[in-house]
Image (cartoon, rainbow, N blue to C red):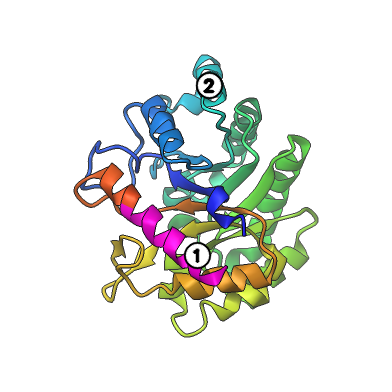
Amino acid sequence: MIFHKKIGYMQGRLSNYKINNLSVYPLNPYEEIETASNFNLSHIEFITKEQVGLDKNNLIWNDIEIKKVLKKNKSFNFRNISFIDNRSVKKNILDLIKYYEKLIKQLKKAQFTILVIPLIEKSDLKKNNLKKFVTALDFISNQCNKNKINFCVETNASVMDFENLKNKMQNKIGLVYDTGNRYLNNKKNYISEIKLLGNNIKHVHLKDRNNKGKNVLLGNGNVNFKNIFKSLKEINYKGYFTIESTREKNAVSSLIKNRRYLYKCLKIIN
């Protein structure tokens, strides 16, 4: 089992900056790279903020900063894997097409291999917008393909609805399986969905939820990670995992707890 070698962390959640906020862009991304390497994480999933406007301070828009990140990665034998664009949460993807064209070019420079776009809130996938979304997603997928980047969406759409989306598209599209969100959306069948989705799953977000739906440390909620890993093993999942957890009162101590719990789960299923 190589799952333990493919576990990374969400950017912003390895520092104590704005500790009470669930998702933040870090003050110093380079310090997070050092932290990740010290704990043998495989990657950091870089982010954009959940906001309508463009965050010009995000290092992805600065070629000099991109080179600094790549140099830092090299010094720690680290690499860029996934990048999640959270602007789609606050602004409809149909209004972000030109933006994605520019973003994908920057992701290529930074050597990212996966682009994740959440189809939730403002970009929620519905039957009445499916046709327009297919056109937009096809364009994004085509741009990713040209730049050798795998394109994935994070959505709570049912297995049938995702298959319907995929069948209407001309280009490839992968799915991010978010453990916490899938649990909230379909508590009875969220694990069986893994086998049904099969090789559509190209990336996994590791998140736990309690009875109130709150994001909690892994193992402190209701998500059955042991069975999730068993099911992923059965479908021969070969992708990466990004921990998307609360930081509680201290980011590093939370990381240690999360990693310890995951390793315990993985040890049991081996």
Task: Give the quarter of the figure containing the N terminus.
Answer: bottom right
Mark toward the start of the polypeptide (2 vs 1): 2
**Left or right, residue 269 beside residue 255:** right
Callout 2 amino acid: Ser
Question: Which residue in the protein does label 1 denote?
Answer: 267
Name the image quarter holding residue 251: top left
Query: In percent of the image, x 57 and y 35: which residue is there?
Result: 80
Q: Position of residue 167 (x, y in %)?
A: 77, 67
Q: Is residue 260 above or below residue 209?
A: above
Residue 117 position in % (x across, y down): 55, 50
Q: Residue at x 38, y 61 (%)?
A: 261
The residue range painted magenta reads: 257-270
Image height check: is 15 above or below 198? Answer: above
Which residue is pictured at 44% across the width and 67% down the height?
181
- Marking on residue 43: none
Marking on residue 75: 2
Foreground of the two, 169 or 159: 159
Magenta segment: does it hold 35? no
Check disc 2: other Cα within 10 Å, few if <14, some if 14-19, many if 20+: few
Q: Residue at x 70, y 56 (%)?
A: 173
Q: Are marks 2 and 1 in contact (CB under 8 Å)?
A: no
Decide if residue 91 is in sight here.
Answer: yes
Image vertical order of residue 215 relative to residue 21, above or below = below
- Which residue sits furthest right? 170
SS for tag 1? helix
Q: Nearer the viewer, mark 2 or mark 1?
A: 1
Does any portion of residue 157 appear in the rendered image? no
